[in-house]
Amino acid sequence: MKTILLLESEKLISDSLERRLTEEGYRLIINNQVEEGLETLAQGEVHLIILDLDISGLNAFSFLARKNNDPRWKKLPTLVISNAGEVGELSRAKEQGVVDWVLKTEFNPEEVVQKVKSIFQAKITI
Amino acid sequence: MERESESELRKQVLLKNLKRQKEIRKLILPLLALVFLFLYVFSLPNFSLVLGSILVLISFSLFFFGNFYFQKNSALTAEGIQQVLIKIIFLELLAAWAGFYLFGAVINSWLIPIAFPASLFFVFYLTLVTPLLAELYRTFFFLISWLGLAFLVLLGHSQSTLSLGNPQPGLDLIDVPSLVSIILAGVALYGVKIVADFTQDQSSWWNQGLKKVNWRLEDKLAGREEAIFKLRRELKETREILQIRTLAHIKEMRRLTEEFQRMVGEKEEVQQHSNQQPEKTREAQETAQALLNILEDSERARRQLVKEEELTTTIIDNFVDGLIILNRQGIIQEVNQRIEEDFQVKEREVQGQPVEILKKYPLIALAVPLIGESDQIRIVHKQEFSTEEGVTIEVSTVSLKSKSRCLGYLMVFHDISREKHIQKMKTDFVSIVAHQLRTPLSAIKWSIRMILDGEAGKVAANQKAWLDKTYQSNERLIALVNDLLNVSHIEEGKFLYDLQKADLGKMVEEVLENTKEVIIQKKLKVSFQKGKESSLAKIDKEKVQLAIQNLVNNAIHYTPPEGEITLSLRKEDDNLLLMVKDNGIGITKADQKKVFQRFFRGRNAVQMRTNGTGLGLFIARNVIEAHQGRIWFESQLGKGTTFYLTIPRLAS
């Protein structure tokens, strides 16, 4: 079973994603703090990270940087979900090795599920 | 002249010839003496041989003395020497003839074969002294020799008595051996002639020597001639100089005379005019008064000018903005107090210096790249730079023109730090509010979506209708918040925060990547052609990306599904040209003038997509123009729109 780390501080969002992804057969660990997320990573069971760029009070980019600096997690695929969808933010995220992203205001949870599926499929084919 | 040198040459030739003959004889005489001594020793006491030898010597002595005499008494002119030579030839012929006869007679009674080498020796001797003689002379010599030999042979055979001066050999006594001897003598002589001719050829070295002598003579003569020419010329010049000097002296004397006459005349005139003195004095006084008046006027004008200048200086110095005045060559003329205070520039240090000197002052150094160097001042409007202390300055350069002639430049440094700060606060505020609003909005959107999708259990039809409406309202609210966020971008677009090297081509690819979801949804055919050249530019990356994103978004939004979008990026002069072409709805003629206006949306655009903000192109233009780029478009209603933008490229 694939384990997904969801870093999301908006409860409604994390709840809806948890529901849909669990239905699809994934195990979800939900953190709403960067430090917590890094601890979860340290336990070494995560296969995919879903990161909200608007994670409250903390900088999602610092999480990305710290994740990338650690050889253990460097290759972990990361999917970004964001409210803003500002050009600069997305470019920066892409530079940090993010594989895909979803804009919350323009997409529905269903599309997130589709993306997660496609990422894992891509991984399998590799 | 030429003839002269020719006769001179001949003279030289003849003299040389004489000398050579003398030298040959010096050699020949001892040899002759030896031969005779030898004959004496073997023929003694043959009296006739002794007598013959003595006669030979006498004949030779005669020849030499004659020769010597002629030489000495000739005047040594060419003709004289020629005569001497002819006489010598005559004497030698005589000597040869006599020698043969005497010698032949002497040896006749004793040993005929000796006559042959002896006569050959004579012939050879003659040939040696005659190479300079003409062919005719030589032939004559050989004939004489042959005749002599033939005579000797016949004489020997007949045994007849020698009769001096009148040899008459008996013709009836010719027999076969005598004939053979004569023929042999002829053959031997012919051989000698060949030797003589050969000697003649060999002697050509001597002719060449003569030629050289000739050339040297010619050179010498030419040199002399040149010297004569020079002398003549000098003489001529001297004469001319003398003439000129004489003329000058005459002129000077005439002038002095005239002056003297004039002085005499003036003296008389002065004496005549001395009566009109008082009137002249009055005139002079009046002139002085007028001059004083003019002086007073100009003094007043000067004071006025100083006052005005002071006023100008005061205005410039107390002006609220920093001012720098440059002349046409970009040399700093004046710097006001505000510049001195704000940028710690000392006027006396920069006055009269080219504008580049400002680089030395860290607070204003960053302005130099904006305004250009002294040889090429750029006319800029409201360009910004920030000092390290966080002060933002807006600099504008104005060309000071008077009657369309450029007199210099005025640079205005306006501190916009406060405006900037307020601007930033406003942007931050809008941005934060927009973000904060969007978080719950997206939560609501997702929740309703989940409920509508039946994730929370089956939804009744009437409940679904209400939820649908709620979902749509929420969507509108999201669009509104997005607009708010864009409003903050509008003003941002004008200012460049972070100029850095970036690859425009990659940025376009990123933008396409960001929008691929919609592209796939709408089944659009998108292609991007990138030129091979480097597409590097120094830009505020986020802003330019926003501008490109807006153009691409428009193309996507206003092109029907399965439409075609073509992008191309290439070098054009110093710029990078980006083209975004779609075959979408196009822009009406009436709307074309307004598309870059804030909040403007075309009528057909509103119909196609309700939730646009009318800010995308406005932002794009602000961004591109802040980068010294250009943005424009071509459009045909119903057929499509092509947007173009240029950005100065970074020279690779």
Image (cartoon, rainbow, N blue to C red):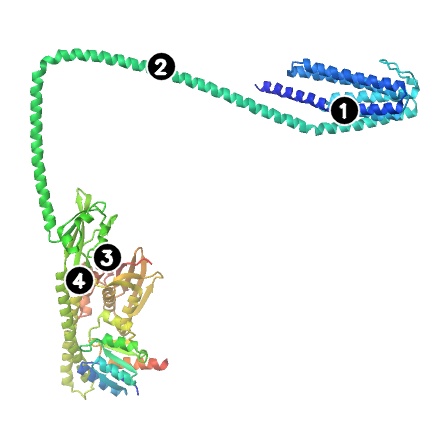
* In the rendered image, residues at marks 3 and 1 fall on the same chain: yes
Q: Which quadrant of the view contains residue B511?
A: bottom left
Chain of the residue that carries numbered disc 1 in the rendered image: B
- Left/right placement of residue B36 relative to residue B74 reads right
Q: Mark 1 points at which residue?
A: B28
The kind of residue tagged 3 is: Gln
Tell which circle, 4 or 2, labels the residue nearer the N-terminal end: 2
* In the rendered image, residues at marks 3 and 2 fall on the same chain: yes
Q: Which quadrant of the view contains residue A7?
A: bottom left
Q: Is mark 3 on a helix, strand or loop?
A: loop
Q: What element carries label 4?
A: loop
The kind of residue tagged 1 is: Ile
Q: Mark 3 points at which residue?
A: B628
Of discs 3 and 2, which sits in the foreground?
A: 2
Chain of the residue that carries numbered disc 2 in the rendered image: B
Q: What residue is rendered at 13% in x and 82% in y? A: B466
